[in-house]
Image (cartoon, grey):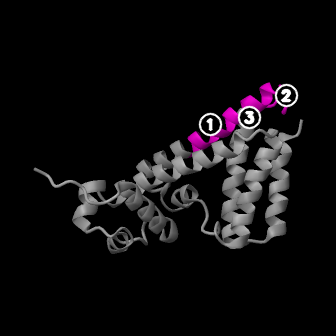
Amino acid sequence: MARPREFDSDAVLERAMQAFWAKGFRATSLDDLCAATGLSRSSLYAAFGGKRSLLHQSLSRYEEQGIARITAALSRPVPIQQAVADFVGNLVENIVTGSGRIGCFIGNCAAELARQDRATAARVRRSLERIEATFRDALVRAQSRGEIAKTADVDAIARFLVAGIQGLRLVGKANPDRAALEDIQSVMLRCLDR
């Protein structure tokens, strides 16, 4: 009979995600993952199926956390323009103060692995599509309330917002200048004008 797990899978995934996010997939060794999670190699493999599987599970965790944050931000009882402005403004603030300067975990994985690793590319694509759908759903609700034009292409706007957020996070890694990031934010928000 197998021994029951003696660790919190969610906590282990969180620590593994942080390790991958800080160093990237290739630069994060199994020893790094063992140190970050407190598990042995055999326990990591038994519980998570290896390094790449652990990365994909970490991406899923990040995706769920991101969607929860976006949903909460866009579900507030304010016009969509204000909700998006506040969400992106918080992102800019996190980048400028340093806590958001490591970029987006999904974007980092795309940049590092998507061209060579089809499974990771598919995983990243799925994450971005789900995030886009979260924005699209909020935009459809806003459109029904008259906050954006009935003729607005909510699919294109959602796609643009996701691309803009990815761009902000990427630019912020190299140049966390508040004025530059706020310029980008301002242009992004124009897509929500009536």
The image quadrant of residue 117 is bottom left
Position of the C terminus by quadrant: top right
Which residue is most to the right? 194
Residue 146, label in figure: 2
Residue 29 placed where, x, y %? 36, 72
Q: Main secondary structure of the magenta part?
A: helix
N-terminal label among 2 and 1: 1
Q: Relative to residue 115, is residue 135 depicted above or below?
A: above
Q: Secondary structure at mark 2?
A: loop
Structural distance between the alpha carbons of marks 3 and 2? 10 Å
Q: Position of residue 40 (x, y in %)?
A: 25, 69
Label 1 packing within 10 angstroms: few (<14), some (14-19), many (20+) = some
Q: Is residue 41 above or below residue 187?
A: below
Q: Which element type, helix, strand or loop, lies under badge 3?
A: helix
The residues colored magenta run 128-152
Q: Marks 2/1: CA distance?
A: 20 Å
Query: Which mark, residue 148?
Result: none
Q: Viewer-proximal residue, 16 or 120?
A: 16
Q: What amino acid is found at the position of numbered circle 3 in the picture?
A: Leu
Res. 133 mark: 1
Residue labelled with disc 3 = 139
Q: Is residue 69 left or right of residue 120?
A: right
Q: In the image, is residue 172 above or below residue 64? A: below
Residue drawn at (86%, 46%), measured in percent from left and top?
190
